[in-house]
Image: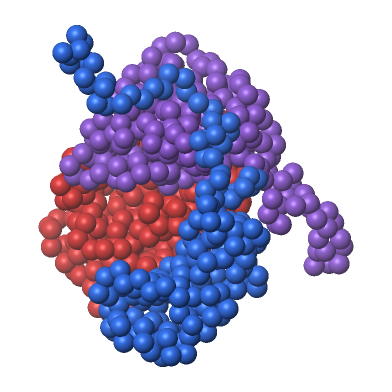
Chain colours: A purple, B red, C blue
Amino acid sequence: MKDELKPRIVKGPDGIEFEVDPLRDYYCEASPSVHPPVYVKIVEDFFNWARSESLWILGFGTGCGAIEMRPLMTPRFDAYRFGVQWRPTPRQANLLMISGYLSTKTLKRAIRSYEQMQSPKYVVGLGSCTINGGMYWDSYNTIKKLDEYLPVDLYIVGCMPRPEALLQGFEDLKQIIRAGKAEGANQYAEKFEWYKANQKKVIHDWDMPDYNW
Amino acid sequence: MDFEWIRIPHALLTLLIVFLYGLLLGAVIQKIGARAGRRHGIPFYQNYIDLIKNYALRTTITHGFMFYLGPVFRLTGGVGLLLFVPTIYGVAMHENFSFAGDLILALYFVFFGSLGMALGAGESGHPYAAIGVSRGLSQVTAAELPFAIAVFAVALQYQTLSVTDIVAAQQGSVFNWTVFTNPLAVTAAMMSFLGSMMRPPFDVVLAPQEIPIGPPTEYHSAYLALMQSNRAIFPIAKMVIYMNLFFGGAANWPVFFLKVFLLYLFAAFVGVVFPRFRVEQSVRWFLVWGVPVAVAGLFWV
Amino acid sequence: MQDLQTRLAQHTDLGEWTQQRADLAFVTVAREHLHGLLRHLRDHEGFTHLVLLTAVDWLEDGQFQLTYLMNNRAAARDIGVRVLIPREGADMDSIHDLWPTAATYQRELREMFGIDFPGSPRVDEEFILEGWRDMPPYRRDFDTLKYAQEEFAERPGRVSKDPETHMKQKLYPDGA
């Protein structure tokens, strides 16, 4: 754990000493709660349609897939046509693309980013590395099965998948969302203990709160 | 002067039309920018969907009282700006709440939203938001200076502080527009216009690639939707002022739509041609080029 | 590069000299000569750029080989200096006083191979791995497959086939 995260005594500018426990004071430790669809079906269907047509991706690249995603913004593929946009901050995004292999160090950041996104949120795993390890099947620091650690809505196979495959993947994800089956955030909240246990099993220096909202 | 209550629903109707048109126009302008880059760009209805989606998100978090008020202030700035200047000249329904000194109030409202945003973004506690706001405020302040001086020039020229009277003085012929009677002041004001439209070359504050998106870093779901609404209304309201002060106003909706579109297109055109300025570069640009022209416009009168 | 070898041999006890290419040579030296040789190469022979510092694990010999690769920009040639150190309790003199960038390489070697460089800045801090508890992963006696199987959850059903026999069976099931 880093020094600045350890509990310590701090002397304020007015000379009063007080205790600081960064993990407790700077973060909220409330665990996630389940937010079921509450509106009547027709409204919820309408909202699901809007959600599916407005996928905002968090610009967070983990592996080689981060390179494969850039062509989607260019004139040749232009994913903006399908309502897919990139957002720079997890607060505004609702689709986390795990683009390729995920080392345990990156997994920590991916979890934090995922937890800061607002529900409903979706996770798409890209490439064989997220599915069963791919070519990193015997690596000492990459995870092999993404859905042990984050609730995945859709996998796109390939090593790496071409941008065409990604566009097809977006269309498939839209159908899942429209059918109301993309409830990954609620699944994460329901099985929170199980996910946390899995995450802590591979991340040895857990120096963040259990839930970062 | 007695108040006619019917003006409230009328003003709300104006607001609704402007809101819907603003969302549409934003997407169309973005599409034009994309076409300049040989892309298809977003569908023209994308902004409506984004708005619905952001309202439909299930979770929100807050960082305190001012965090709520930030977007509200911002929206108030846009709505207030629109409500207190006549949108369509000569049509009682869309005169809104214009009165004798509304020009001063409008100047205030142009700045109001940014200040609210500064408070809200500061409360969010995110360092990027604070940096974004300080950069944004310095740029907007610099951009506002030529505009304010140009507005004084116009007010001096027509000897009035009422937007309605200024529009009235420009009627009759195209050559009565301020853009022909006082081109220097209009040039300075158009420079300022580029600065406040948050499009390139002056969008370093809000550009997603820069310090990640600036002031709204922490804003999400319904807060962000409020700010999106403002991004639809505020540019239009701002262009209404420009249209009224410099380009003869609009006597009916088609003329209004056309003039606003052309003004927006001007900003978009400059945006796709020129690369982005850094904040200190743009501040210098406004002070070196904008302010002298505006002062010259003042002497022109 | 014969001339260089002759000149260096005059005042340093050189070990094995390998001429890899016309512009690339490797030389083995004892560890106590390393620092002086590197300084001489840098200051008098024009090898001003440290290209890389890496290690090889000779598990069977019980030795680590450290390779300091340097580049002479003006003469467009490289020289690699090899040092062999014992594998048990491996440590080496730091060269961060010659090239400050070497400190980064030494941090990496400390983490990945477990070679200590006393006095090198921040050498004991974590470099790439976070919270690593096992033996340094680049050592050859570290079994990454076993570690990966124990540590990370696996998706069942993964099989791999030898392409030659697999295609043979698929195309000629009768064994023709």
Q: Residue at x 81, y 60 (%)?
A: A10
- Which of the pair C64/B286 is nearer the observer? C64
Residue B121 appears in the picture as rendered: no
Q: Residue at x 46, y 70 (%)?
A: C82
Q: Residue at x 25, y 44 (%)?
A: A71
The answer to whether B129 appears left or right of A13 in the picture is: left
Residue B43 % position (x, y):
24, 34
Q: How many marks?
A: 0
Quarter-of-image position of residue A210 = top right
Q: Residue at x 58, y 73 (%)?
A: C94
State the residue lying farthest toward the right.
A16
Residue A58 % position (x, y):
42, 41
- Which of the pair B173/A97 is nearer the observer? A97
Residue A33 % position (x, y):
63, 25
Residue A148 % position (x, y):
53, 26
Q: Is residue C35 above or below residue B81?
A: below
Q: Quadrant of the C terminus of chain B?
A: bottom left
- Which of the pair C115/B299 is nearer the observer? C115
The answer to whether C27 appears left or right of B174 in the picture is: right
Q: Quadrant of the N terminus of chain B?
A: top left
Residue A1 appears in the picture as rendered: yes
